[in-house]
Image (spheres, rainbow, N blue to C red):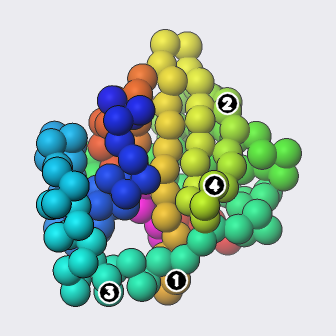
Amino acid sequence: MLGQITEIDKLILLYKYETQGTLETESVLDISDEEARFIRTSGEYILWEAGKRDFDYPEMANSHWLETTYRGQAAKLDCLRTRDAVLCPLFLRDQFYGEWHIHNGFLRMSIESAHHHIELFSVANYDSNIHPILLFKDKELVGSANITLMV
Protein backbone atom coordinates (compact mmCIF):
# COMPACT_ATOMS: atom_id res chain seq x y z
CA MET A 1 0.00 0.00 0.00
CA LEU A 2 1.19 3.48 -0.83
CA GLY A 3 0.46 4.75 2.65
CA GLN A 4 2.85 2.20 4.14
CA ILE A 5 5.78 2.97 1.81
CA THR A 6 7.91 5.81 3.19
CA GLU A 7 10.16 8.17 1.22
CA ILE A 8 13.11 6.07 2.43
CA ASP A 9 11.43 2.93 1.07
CA LYS A 10 10.84 4.70 -2.25
CA LEU A 11 14.49 5.74 -2.45
CA ILE A 12 15.58 2.16 -1.78
CA LEU A 13 13.23 0.97 -4.53
CA LEU A 14 14.65 3.52 -6.98
CA TYR A 15 18.17 2.51 -5.97
CA LYS A 16 17.39 -1.16 -6.64
CA TYR A 17 15.73 -0.28 -9.94
CA GLU A 18 18.69 1.75 -11.20
CA THR A 19 21.49 -0.48 -9.91
CA GLN A 20 19.96 -3.92 -10.40
CA GLY A 21 17.71 -3.20 -13.37
CA THR A 22 14.75 -4.84 -11.67
CA LEU A 23 12.17 -3.89 -9.14
CA GLU A 24 10.69 -6.46 -6.84
CA THR A 25 7.82 -4.64 -5.20
CA GLU A 26 7.25 -7.24 -2.50
CA SER A 27 10.77 -6.92 -1.07
CA VAL A 28 10.35 -3.34 0.14
CA LEU A 29 7.08 -4.05 1.87
CA ASP A 30 8.79 -6.61 4.07
CA ILE A 31 12.03 -4.70 4.64
CA SER A 32 12.92 -4.14 8.27
CA ASP A 33 14.35 -0.92 9.66
CA GLU A 34 17.64 -2.74 10.19
CA GLU A 35 17.78 -3.89 6.55
CA ALA A 36 16.95 -0.38 5.35
CA ARG A 37 19.76 1.06 7.50
CA PHE A 38 22.17 -1.55 6.11
CA ILE A 39 21.26 -0.68 2.50
CA ARG A 40 21.43 3.08 3.11
CA THR A 41 24.87 2.86 4.71
CA SER A 42 26.42 0.66 2.02
CA GLY A 43 29.05 2.32 -0.13
CA GLU A 44 27.16 1.57 -3.34
CA TYR A 45 23.99 3.24 -2.03
CA ILE A 46 25.93 6.28 -0.80
CA LEU A 47 27.54 6.68 -4.26
CA TRP A 48 24.14 6.28 -5.91
CA GLU A 49 22.60 8.89 -3.63
CA ALA A 50 25.50 11.29 -4.27
CA GLY A 51 24.52 11.25 -7.95
CA LYS A 52 21.05 12.58 -7.12
CA ARG A 53 19.77 16.13 -6.80
CA ASP A 54 16.53 17.93 -6.05
CA PHE A 55 14.05 18.73 -8.78
CA ASP A 56 13.18 22.43 -8.92
CA TYR A 57 10.21 24.42 -10.16
CA PRO A 58 11.92 26.14 -13.16
CA GLU A 59 13.07 22.76 -14.44
CA MET A 60 9.57 21.29 -14.27
CA ALA A 61 7.33 24.22 -15.17
CA ASN A 62 6.27 24.04 -18.79
CA SER A 63 8.37 20.94 -19.50
CA HIS A 64 7.67 17.94 -21.71
CA TRP A 65 8.82 14.43 -20.85
CA LEU A 66 8.84 10.99 -22.41
CA GLU A 67 7.93 8.25 -19.94
CA THR A 68 9.14 4.75 -20.85
CA THR A 69 8.62 1.49 -19.01
CA TYR A 70 10.74 -1.63 -19.18
CA ARG A 71 7.83 -3.30 -21.02
CA GLY A 72 8.21 -0.84 -23.88
CA GLN A 73 5.18 1.26 -23.03
CA ALA A 74 5.60 4.99 -23.58
CA ALA A 75 3.70 8.17 -22.83
CA LYS A 76 4.19 11.90 -23.23
CA LEU A 77 4.03 13.77 -19.94
CA ASP A 78 3.47 17.52 -19.91
CA CYS A 79 4.09 19.53 -16.73
CA LEU A 80 2.49 22.96 -16.97
CA ARG A 81 3.42 26.13 -15.07
CA THR A 82 0.12 25.89 -13.23
CA ARG A 83 1.31 22.56 -11.75
CA ASP A 84 -1.20 20.71 -13.90
CA ALA A 85 -0.01 17.51 -15.56
CA VAL A 86 -1.19 15.80 -18.73
CA LEU A 87 -0.28 12.18 -19.48
CA CYS A 88 -0.81 11.02 -23.06
CA PRO A 89 0.02 7.34 -23.69
CA LEU A 90 1.58 6.97 -27.12
CA PHE A 91 -0.51 5.08 -29.67
CA LEU A 92 -3.71 5.82 -27.71
CA ARG A 93 -6.00 8.80 -28.01
CA ASP A 94 -6.55 9.02 -24.27
CA GLN A 95 -5.32 11.89 -22.15
CA PHE A 96 -5.22 11.80 -18.37
CA TYR A 97 -5.08 14.87 -16.18
CA GLY A 98 -3.64 15.56 -12.78
CA GLU A 99 -1.11 17.68 -10.97
CA TRP A 100 2.58 17.70 -10.17
CA HIS A 101 4.50 19.14 -7.26
CA ILE A 102 7.93 19.01 -5.72
CA HIS A 103 8.17 17.94 -2.08
CA ASN A 104 11.55 17.65 -0.33
CA GLY A 105 13.16 17.80 -3.79
CA PHE A 106 11.23 14.77 -5.05
CA LEU A 107 8.87 15.00 -8.00
CA ARG A 108 5.39 13.73 -7.22
CA MET A 109 2.49 13.47 -9.63
CA SER A 110 -1.10 12.50 -9.12
CA ILE A 111 -3.09 11.61 -12.25
CA GLU A 112 -6.68 10.44 -12.63
CA SER A 113 -8.01 8.11 -15.30
CA ALA A 114 -11.57 6.88 -15.71
CA HIS A 115 -10.93 3.86 -13.51
CA HIS A 116 -7.64 4.42 -11.69
CA HIS A 117 -5.68 6.86 -9.57
CA ILE A 118 -2.03 6.95 -10.70
CA GLU A 119 0.85 8.38 -8.68
CA LEU A 120 4.44 8.89 -9.77
CA PHE A 121 7.49 9.47 -7.57
CA SER A 122 10.91 10.47 -8.90
CA VAL A 123 14.35 11.66 -7.83
CA ALA A 124 16.57 13.62 -10.25
CA ASN A 125 19.96 12.56 -11.55
CA TYR A 126 22.82 15.08 -11.58
CA ASP A 127 24.47 13.96 -14.78
CA SER A 128 21.50 13.10 -16.98
CA ASN A 129 18.11 14.32 -18.12
CA ILE A 130 16.79 10.76 -17.62
CA HIS A 131 15.30 10.14 -14.18
CA PRO A 132 13.86 6.98 -12.58
CA ILE A 133 10.24 6.93 -11.41
CA LEU A 134 8.06 4.63 -9.36
CA LEU A 135 4.54 3.96 -10.63
CA PHE A 136 1.60 3.44 -8.27
CA LYS A 137 -1.89 2.53 -9.39
CA ASP A 138 -4.72 2.71 -6.88
CA LYS A 139 -2.16 2.97 -4.03
CA GLU A 140 -0.33 -0.20 -5.10
CA LEU A 141 3.21 -0.15 -6.44
CA VAL A 142 2.96 -1.52 -9.98
CA GLY A 143 6.41 -0.85 -11.39
CA SER A 144 9.07 1.57 -12.44
CA ALA A 145 10.00 3.57 -15.50
CA ASN A 146 12.15 6.46 -16.66
CA ILE A 147 11.23 9.97 -17.65
CA THR A 148 13.39 11.78 -20.18
CA LEU A 149 13.27 15.53 -20.70
CA MET A 150 12.41 16.34 -24.31
CA VAL A 151 14.32 19.36 -25.52
- The reply to whether discs 2 and 1 touch (Cβ–Cβ < 8 Å) is no
Q: Which of the two discs, 2 and 4, labels the residue nearer the N terminus?
A: 2
Residue at 67%, 30% in the rendered image: 97
Tell me how far mark 2 sits from mark 1, CA to CA: 28 Å
Residue bearing mark 2: 97
Residue at 15%, 42% in the rendered image: 30
In the image, is residue 94 above or below residue 56? above
Tell me how far mark 1 sits from mark 3, CA to CA: 12 Å
Q: Is residue 47 magenta?
A: no
Residue bearing mark 3: 47
Residue 60 falls left or right of residue 28: right
In the image, is residue 48 above or below residue 16? below
Q: Which residues are magenta?
A: 130-134
* Mark 4 crowd level (few <14, some 14–19, many ≥20, 10 Å Cα): few
Tell me how far mark 2 sits from mark 3, CA to CA: 36 Å
Q: Which of the two discs, 2 and 3, labels the residue nearer the N terminus?
A: 3
Q: Which of the two discs, 2 and 1, labels the residue nearer the N terminus?
A: 2
Q: Secondary structure at mark 3?
A: helix
Which marked residue is nearer to the observer: mark 4 or mark 1?
4
The three-letter code of the residue at mark 3 reads Leu
